Amino acid sequence: MSIELFKLEKTQNRVWFDFGTSRRLLPYFHFGSEFFIEYDRDISIVPDSILVIPFLTNILPIAWVLDAEIILPEIDEDFYKSIPEIKRGYEEMYPMISFRGKVTPRRITRNTKKSEGRPVAFFSGGVDAHNTLIRHLQEKPVMVTIWGSDVFFNDREGWLNVSEHATMTASAFGLDVVKVKSNFRSFLNEGLLSTIVTSSGDGWWRGFQHGIGIIGHAAPITWIYDSPSVYIASSRSSKDIIQGLTCASHPSIDGKVRFAGTQVIHDSFEMSRQDKIECIVSFTKKTHKNIQLHVCWESSGGKNCNTCEKCLRTILGIISAGANPDDFGLHYNAQNMILIKNKLHKKTKNLYYFILIGNYIEIWNSFNANNIILQYPELQWFKDFEFEKIANTITKRKTLLIHPWKRLFRM
Ligand SMILES: [Zn+2]
């Protein structure tokens, strides 16, 4: 079986990929919609061997799990050499799946640049992305925001808000922002692809595509900006009390990607989400910069709903770091916190519950260390919650938390 890229079609700021596949692979693609990427600037100076990288980073996992050969006219040498290392990251993450397939370029091109320019940092507007931006602010990173990743094309209002937020953040920090529109999620048959990886316990997007699928979009930008590195913010952490949860965006995969002398860095994996919130809060206290967080993907329209679990968790995190959520684009309402209280008091014994506990324990430590109860006496239930006891149980039972991660937790 094969996937053949015939050629790259391009205009000044848009590239689309003319490709075909063996008959058996056809159902895995939505061929009515071609795969295209649009940048909000001129990409005509970017060599084809680099422009092809976002196509490859989204196709490679398909070729690996379906044992297909990718045939293409040309590839960047550094990227070509990094492919076996990226693949090894997947193999280690999903030992129950065999990763085969191969890449056959007609030409391997060595692209050299000085790599003396600014790095690139992906920016979605949330806690992880802001933390990465702040930690690398001295390097003046070029921000990159993608329409088609978490916000789909039919959510125009959502994109306008996300886009405006990125522009506002870039101008507050004196940075450049590159906006990218890409149908990298919708040109694939995500539902069908998910069915071939069910043994992993993950869906296609979360477990196999996002991570390198997003990262590839940066390759042409790094050529334009002569970037030495690309930062992609971690969402999980080495501090998580539940280890072994799988996700395609991980240091063992992202950190292996290289192209034309540029190295990808999976940033701040050593920090918990609460560490990141504290970093953001202390940055705003020091610099008096205004940071508006966009953490909610439950509501369309690109705004925080202040009622979903993620919004409430972030609100609690900001309070626990000794700051006012209203200063960060969120709003505290004691009544809404009952949702969290109910979730935590449910005390079920499945893994989702323990993931929930893991998400709150760092906030709870910070809440206690900063004696936040004095300011919010109505959160006494949170202070009294037996996080330590449950966390100890989880730590003792760690060995059960190997794949598949959806297995029920026996105690
Ligand atoms: Zn929300």
Image (spheres, grey):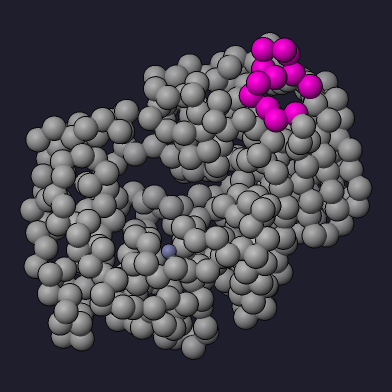
The image shows residue 190 at horizontal and vertical percentages of 57, 33
Q: Position of residue 106 (x, y in %)?
A: 83, 21
Q: Residue at x 80, y 60 (%)?
A: 40
Q: Is residue 102 left or right of residue 85?
A: right
Quadrant of the image occupied by residue 25? top right
Image quadrant holding the N terminus, namely: top right
Asked whether residue 315 is in view, the answer is yes
Picture coordinates of residue 352 (x, y %)? Answer: 27, 44
Identify which residue is drawn at 12% across, 74% down: 380
In the image, is residue 178 part of the stretch drawn in magenta?
no
**Range drawn in magenta:** 20-31
* Residue 9 image point, x, y percent: 89, 38
User: Is residue 30 within the magenta segment?
Assistant: yes
Query: Residue drawn at (59%, 61%), measured in percent from left and top?
Result: 123
Which residue is pictured at 67% across the width and 53% down the height?
154
Quadrant field for ligand 1: bottom left
Of 117 and 128, nearer the camera is 128
Question: Of residues 247 and 118, which is closer to you in this image?
Answer: 247
